[in-house]
């Protein structure tokens, strides 16, 4: 038999204690940039993966993104040439920020400090030069398709740098010319206008509360919305699809009083939904905002609530066609089945424990409306007899004729009764 060497319990206890002391939490307090959880990513990995440019450490070294590295360095050099300060001062700024930047990522950064500083510096200056070119020239001036893909890539959750890094470098680089629209606007204004998020309300934004560009996108929708103020400690009650609701008597109408996609309204028997323009970018934006909420805002998941309601309303391509006919969906994807697949996939492997209080009321009211038998009967009559102008005229004429016949019959009976009584 093999002899097992006995260890002093105190030595083992010390080793265990040392091991426990070295353990670090899953996410640091300042963490705001996350790897999309595998369960969520698996439903459509392309929606979370940059197509042309890598920003930050997560996708650095991806073979298909290496072609943009030289272009990033060219833009970085141009930014330094524009700058009012020198390269050394800008690098020193990044070096001071490096520990805080490192703490912003959910995964351990394998890069050493110097390599990480280089990545942060080049990526940040590349984006600043890109934004300034758009600000002064109205375009990025590469290729139209490439410019568009870069726009999309900069909104991906895994492809982010913290917002504060951009502001620090930008404010240092243009310290004497940050005087509104005449020379260099604030960095916040610069990025808001790049994504057409300004809406003449730049002053209402607080850049200190914005984590990164994905967070900026989410904040834009929430700031516009009238229905994102309170939460309910319950999940949303399930509702029927758009066609089923229509058959139960619910009318669908475009909400023209709000430009925010989140502002759903239901009163009387009319559900108002803001216009939804669907294109190739729609799924990318929605998925990355939902992923951010799952990781960073689990108790304030307003975008996720919205996608859940749309997932229920859009069950098949017939629901899509119905909403297109009502002017609620503008389908630039072309294929109604693709739209249904888009919304049906957004909520896969998503966890919700609270809900938008206004959406909760809307869903409950819709369910109560559908349960009322009178509403369904009225809807059936309207569908069967009044769904076209000619049917409406014919139905009214038929009812009028029936009433006239009944009156005539009653009058005839009365005449007979009166005659027999004489």
Image (cartoon, rainbow, N blue to C red):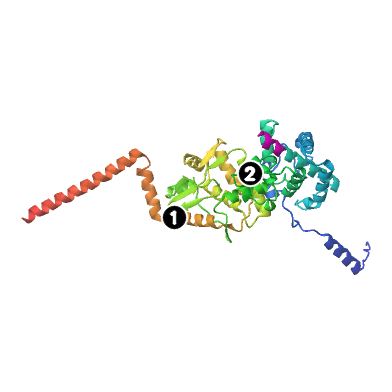
Q: Is residue 370 left or right of residue 144?
A: left
Give the residue number, with chain letter if any, for mark 2.
Answer: 285
User: Which residue corresponds to the image point at 85% horizontal and 46% vertical from the top-left?
Assistant: 114
The residue segment tinted magenta is 130-138
- Quickly name the residue at label 1: 369
Q: Was residue 132 drawn as part of the magenta stretch in this picture?
A: yes
Is residue 229 found inside the magenta-colored segment of the image?
A: no
Q: Position of residue 299 (x, y in %)?
A: 63, 58
What is the residue that sits farthest to the left in this orientation? 422
Q: CA distance from mark 2 to mark 1?
A: 33 Å
Q: Residue 288 placed where, x, y %?
A: 66, 46
For label 2, the crowd category at 10 Å Cα-Cα, with few meaning under 14, some 14 to 19 and many 20 or more, is some
Foreground pick, 12 / 167:
167
Residue 370 vs residue 337: left or right?
left
Kind of element beneath mark 1: helix
In the structure shown, which secondary structural element does the residue marked by tag 2 occupy?
helix
Q: Is residue 44 visible?
A: no
SS assignment for the magenta stretch, majority? helix
Question: Does residue 129 sit above or below 374 in this rendering?
Answer: above
Side (left or right) of 384 relative to 208: left
- Residue 220 is labelled as none
């Amino acid at each position: 038999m093999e002899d097992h060497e006995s260890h002093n319990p105190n030595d083992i206890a010390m080793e265990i204690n040392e091991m426990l002391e070295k353990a670090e939490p899953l996410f640091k307090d300042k963490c705001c940039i996350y790897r999309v959880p595998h369960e969520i990513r698996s439903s459509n990995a392309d929606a979370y993966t940059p197509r042309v440019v890598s920003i930050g450490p997560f996708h650095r070294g991806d073979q298909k993104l290496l072609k943009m590295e030289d272009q990033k360095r060219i833009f970085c050099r141009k930014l330094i040439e524009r700058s009012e300060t020198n390269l050394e001062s800008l690098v020193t700024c990044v070096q001071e920020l490096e520990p805080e930047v490192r703490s912003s990522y959910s995964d351990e950064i394998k890069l050493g400090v110097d390599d990480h500083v280089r990545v942060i510096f080049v990526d940040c200056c590349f984006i600043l030069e890109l934004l300034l070119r758009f600000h002064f020239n109205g375009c990025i001036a590469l290729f139209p398709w490439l410019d568009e893909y870069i726009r999309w890539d900069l909104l991906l959750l895994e492809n982010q740098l913290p917002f504060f890094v951009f502001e620090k470098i930008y404010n240092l680089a243009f310290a004497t010319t940050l005087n509104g629209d005449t020379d260099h606007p604030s960095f916040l204004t610069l990025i808001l206008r790049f994504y057409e998020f300004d809406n003449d309300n730049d002053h209402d934004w607080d850049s200190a509360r914005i984590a990164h560009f994905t967070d900026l996108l989410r904040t834009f929708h929430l700031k516009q919305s009238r229905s994102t103020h309170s939460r309910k400690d319950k999940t949303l009650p399930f509702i029927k699809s758009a066609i089923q609701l229509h058959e139960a008597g619910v009318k669908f109408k475009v909400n023209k009083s709000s430009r925010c996609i989140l502002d759903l309204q239901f009163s009387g028997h009319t559900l108002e939904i803001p216009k939804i323009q669907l294109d190739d970018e729609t799924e990318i934006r929605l998925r990355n905002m939902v992923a951010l909420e799952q990781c960073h805002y689990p108790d304030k998941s307003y975008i996720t609530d919205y996608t859940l309601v749309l997932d229920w309303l859009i069950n098949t391509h017939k629901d899509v066609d119905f909403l297109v006919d009502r002017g609620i969906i503008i389908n630039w994807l072309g294929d109604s089945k693709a739209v249904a697949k888009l919304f049906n996939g957004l909520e896969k492997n998503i966890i919700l424990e609270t809900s938008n209080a206004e959406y909760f009321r809307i869903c409950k009211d819709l369910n109560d409306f559908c349960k009322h038998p009178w509403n369904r009967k009225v809807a059936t009559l309207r569908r069967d007899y009044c769904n076209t102008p000619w049917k409406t005229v014919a139905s009214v004429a038929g009812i009028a004729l029936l009433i006239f016949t009944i009156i005539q019959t009653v009058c005839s009976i009365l005449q007979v009764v009166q005659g027999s009584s004489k």
